[in-house]
Image (tube, rainbow, N blue to C red):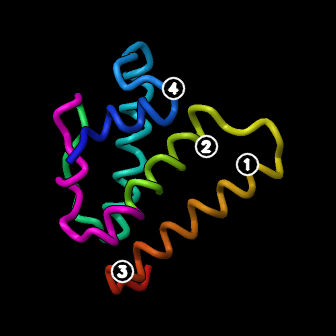
Amino acid sequence: MSSILKTIRKRCIGDETADHFDTTLLSLINLALATLDVNGVDWNKAVIDETAQWSMTTTDAKLLAFVQEYVYTSVTLIFDPPDSKAARDSMESVANKYLWYINSVLGGEN
């Protein structure tokens, strides 16, 4: 499986080795994962470097896809939000849908 930080770097910056925004990205990744933890994804640790792997968040492949997309969307909304309000609103709606899907997969009622 792949590194959480490297994946988010690649998707947000375009280069998984570009570490000049790591402090900000790590903070936003941890915020998104904390939100998921509150919503039933058992994640009670901080991502502090490249060693944290996506496989550490869940072993359920369906859930993992939603977790990855939720984290990316949440990070992007703060790190590099779209310029237009319509695009931001759409992205926020997508993030909320991912969170709903995650709760559905987990059988939660949050």
Report, in whole angstroms, how far the alpha carbon at label 3 lies from the one at label 2: 24 Å
Mark linked to residue 77? 2
Mark linked to residue 88? 1
Position of residue 53 measured from the top left corner of the image (x, y, whole percent): 20, 44
Image quarter (top left, top right, bottom left or bottom right) of the C terminus? bottom left
Task: Indicate whether residue 55 is drawn in magenta.
Answer: yes
Circle 3 sits on which residue? 105
Position of residue 45 measured from the top left corner of the image (x, y, whole percent): 19, 47
What residue is drawn where x is 36% and y is 83%? 108
The amino acid type of the residue labelled 1 equals Arg
The amino acid type of the residue labelled 2 equals Leu
Report, in whole angstroms, how far the alpha carbon at label 2 lies from the one at label 1: 7 Å
The amino acid type of the residue labelled 4 equals Ile
Position of residue 11 measured from the top left corner of the image (x, y, whole percent): 48, 36
The amino acid type of the residue labelled 3 equals Val
- N-term mark: 1 or 3: 1
What residue is drawn where x is 33% and y is 69%? 63
Snapshot quadrant of residue 20: top left
- N-term mark: 3 or 2: 2
Mark 3 secondary-structure assignment? helix
Circle 4 sits on which residue? 13
Mark 4 secondary-structure assignment? helix
What residue is drawn where x is 23% and y is 28%? 49
